Amino acid sequence: MTTWLFRDDPYMRTAPARVTALTDEGGIVLDRTIFYPTGGGQPGDSGQLRWNGGEIEIATTVKGDEDDLVLVPAEPSPLPPVGARLDQALDWDRRHRHMRVHTALHLLSVVIPLPVTGGAITAEKGRLDFDMPEAPEDRDALETTLNELIACDFDVSEEWITEAELDAQPGLVKTMSVAPPRGAGKIRLVRIGTGENTADLQPCGGTHVAHTAQIGRVRLGKIEKKGKQNRRVHLHLEG
């Protein structure tokens, strides 16, 4: 099984690893990786692998069997052999922008305290879909409040609870469309803030910035009606 290094340190940009398998589709499985896999609305990481005698560009990362993660090459190319030692390097700018957008979307769910029905992240923007029968009266006020929360420079941390503890606190789950992954006996929570100054606490498996000020200023885009009760709120990084 792949060790998910990004879970312990989302700021790790490079790391050595060993190839444990090659998939029939040409994917590469490592014993440990800094590459985040597609999931929870966040795209899989891209970057490069380099080994003695070769290198390859990675276009994305996906989940494989069990806890294995599969690195998908950008184009057909000679692959490192099973057992090879190599160095992996993230496309850090892209990943860090994903982290900024993802953390900003958590705060958007605070500014708009309604059930979330979907979401997506890119390196430039993100969006959340809300169970929102009526459009907000003042989008500019929401944007101002969101940027004020970001500027508070809250710490962003993780903690773990049991599945039973989560069942006893159903209000922690904001997403209606995606349930927290179960089966391992514990659930990862992402906390923005500390103690009584906690701005947000919810299950999440994604990568986030360490402090909200690293998000920078954001801009709310259009708010689209999607179905009878759903509205899609777009969020853009400004830098």
Image (cartoon, rainbow, N blue to C red):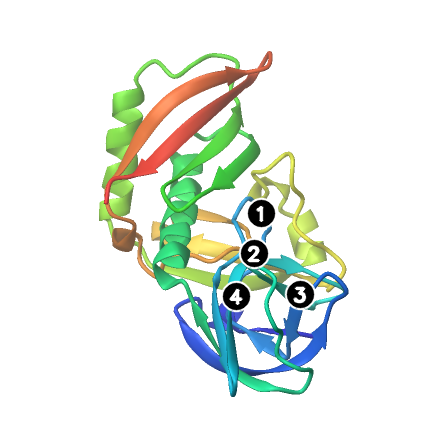
Residue 194 visible (yes or no): no
Q: Residues within 10 Å of mark 3 (few under 14, many from 20)?
A: some
Tag nearer the camera, 4 or 2: 4
Distance between the alpha carbons at the discs numbered 3 and 1? 21 Å
Q: Which numbered marker is on residue 205? A: 2
Badge 3 is on which residue?
27
Distance between the alpha carbons at the discs numbered 2 and 1? 7 Å
Check disc 4 and report its element: helix, strand or loop.
loop
Q: Are marks 2 and 3 in contact (CB under 8 Å)?
A: no
Image location of residue 176, percent across then percent down: 63, 34
Distance between the alpha carbons at the discs numbered 1 and 4? 15 Å
Side of 158 where 215 appears, left or right: left
Image location of residue 75, percent across then percent down: 57, 59
Check disc 3 and report its element: helix, strand or loop.
loop
Is residue 58 or residue 206 the one in the foreground? 58
Choose the circle earlier in sequence order: 3 or 4: 3
Amino acid carrying label 3: it is Gly
Image location of residue 41, percent across then percent down: 55, 44
